[in-house]
Amino acid sequence: MSHELKSGFFFLGLSLLVIWESLRVELGSFMEPGSGFLTLGAGLAICTLSVVLICRGWKVRETQKPFSRRVLLVVASLFIYSLVLNLLGFVLATFFLVGSLFYLGQPRQWWWLIGISALVSALTYLIFGVFLHVYFPRGFLGI
Amino acid sequence: LETIQSLAYGFTVCLTPENLLYCFIGVLLGTLIGVLPGIGPSGTIALLLPLIFHAPAVSAVIMLSGIVYGAQYGGSITSILLNVPGEASSVITCLDGYQMALKGRAGPALGISALGSFIAGTLGVMGLMLFAPTLAKFALRFGPPEFSSLAFMSLTLVTYVSKGSVVKSLIMACVGLTMGMVGMDPITSRTRFTFGVSFLTDGFELVYVAMGLFGLSEVLVNLGQTIKREVLDAKIKNLFPNRQDWKDSAMPIARGTILGFFLGIIPGFGQAIPTFLSYAVEKKLSKHPEKFGTGAIEGVAGPESCNNAASSGTFIPLLSLGIPANPSTAILLGALLILGLQPGPLLISGRPDLFWGLVASMYVGNVMLVLLNLPLIGLWIQMLKIPYSLLYVFIVLLCQIGAYSVNNSVNDVLLINIFGLIGYLMKRYEFEGAPLLLGLVLGPMLESSLRRALMMSDGSPLIFFTRPISAVFLIVSIAFLLTPLFSKERVGKKAIEAED
């Protein structure tokens, strides 16, 4: 399935959702347009354009480039970071994030990773937490 | 005389130690991100949005604007020394700039680029100073029909000049418009598109959408590619161009300035497209067009002046009409709204400290940029040697901390990561972020003015065509919407190529 076909179907689904919600929230009239007036227009436009994409994508055969493993792992690290930030606290969660990001950028010696991660997390805490008064989560260790 | 008095007032605002510091930070960051491939001015402004909550309004705007025009200076350094453009607006500089460097003329190439940028930047600010207040006074005649047609025209132009498929760009603009209307309807107070999710009641905040789509996604895209950087090791000498270089560059600088400034005013053109036109014009007018691409100084002077003048031009619709011309100014518009300012015709008269302080800071900023770019060229070359595998960690970390610090909320960190992933997928599937961002920013203005215009006319859509200014905007929009139908160059170009 080509990129155009996949994205065409995605936006067709999205447009149906937009149209449904626009009709639900009151369309109004030309004399007194309601909350869903302009969004209905946008939804109909997305619907029409996604049909164009589907028609175009139907004819295209293309080889798909695989996702970069490094990008997927970085994205996974970022989502894990946002999920554990409250639990582990800023310093500890940032230590693990920075370590994994440096490793994913270029594999290095473990002592280098630990040292630089500790330094970066401590410095960012000092700059943002202490000097700029950002109230970071403290986590179960209280740091 | 009134303009000179206002400018003098602007200098009193700008020349305070605090504002000078913010101006310096802005142009320094602008040069830095211009030098470093992999993050653009839109991404950087988006990353710095959380910081403006802690800064005075004028200082914050001075700093963010410094990034926009500062990036145009830095972008040429990598084009000339690495054959890798630091910014989209410096792509064309690679053609002759790198060839000059290979021939041992990196110094004059960098020199003419910085000095041409300074001349164009300064003239561009003069243009901004003269045109923006005039346009704002003219725009006081605008009513809801004109504003809705203007917003519609801006969106149409942005989709037309976007890279790739117009169909995809139009989809992005419509998705952006819809996203701009998520949350509470300001007229009826009814919530829409929230689907029971409480944080959507306030709508999508520009901060995390812009940081995700333009900051984080750029990093993810670059991580998926191999960035090879081989800096020319030869010592850079003779930064000041000689008499012949000046003779060859004078007219290209003048033409590039005029072209860039006026095209920069038109929404959608931004800084990159005018540089290609400038290069084409210089090649066409040259007595030796065959020298272009082999190290002609005109091929550096014209486009580099053009992108700086264009960057001044983009501020005119932003400050006088409240209409952003490109993603960077769209994020700046968002910043102005965050700071409690209402961009539009009343901004210049209502907040002269902001407008004239900004104009004065641009004169000062351009001087700072020449001083930063020429004597410190060795430092920027050293910066180029930092591997991306180290640099990206700091950009990503800044994204995460920036998102968190807006509301001290982990949810915002999650949201920026979600939008970063969406931005990455959009780039992979060749969807442009600029129309979406402009749709998001212009959506509320378009909706409220459209609804008010229809109420004014008792429901007659003819009001958009019977008022002359509105009619002109709509005719331009329709012309740009219909043009791709008659041109095989744009619609389905990629699909046809893939089919072949």
Image (tube, grey):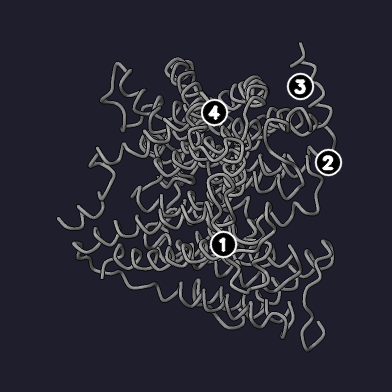
Rendered image: mark on residue B232 = none
Comparing A99 with B377, the one in front is A99
Residue found at x 38% / y 29% = B277
Q: Is residue B191 left or right of residue A140?
A: left
Q: Chain of mark 4?
A: B
Q: Secondary structure at mark 2?
A: helix
Report which residue position mark 3 lands on. B7
Earlier in the chain: of badge 4 and badge 3, it is 3
Q: Identify the disc placed on residue B18.
A: 2
Spatial CA distance of label 4 from label 2 is 27 Å
Identify the chain of the residue marked 2, using the numbered disc in the image. B
In the image, what residue occupies the spot 52% across and 65% down? A21
Q: Amino acid at mark 1?
A: Gly
Is disc 4 placed on a helix, strand or loop? helix
Q: Earlier in the sequence, mark 1 or mark 2?
A: 2
Q: Is residue B130 above or below residue B494?
A: above
Q: Nearer the viewer, mark 1 or mark 4?
A: 1
Disc number at residue B212? 1
Circle nearer the N terminus (4, 2): 2
Q: Earlier in the sequence, mark 3 or mark 2?
A: 3
- Looking at the image, can residue B385 be seen? no
In 3D space, how far apart are the residues under numbered discs 1 and 2 (Cα atoms)?
A: 30 Å
Which numbered disc, 3 or 1, marks the residue that appears first in the sequence? Answer: 3
Q: Is the residue B243 above or below the residue A74 in the image?
A: above
- B289 lies left or right of A107: left
Residue depicted at 33% across the width and 50% down the height: B165
Q: Residues within 10 Å of mark 3 (few under 14, many from 20)?
A: many
* Residue placed under numbered mark 4 in the picture: B309
Distance (Cα) linking label 3 and label 1: 37 Å
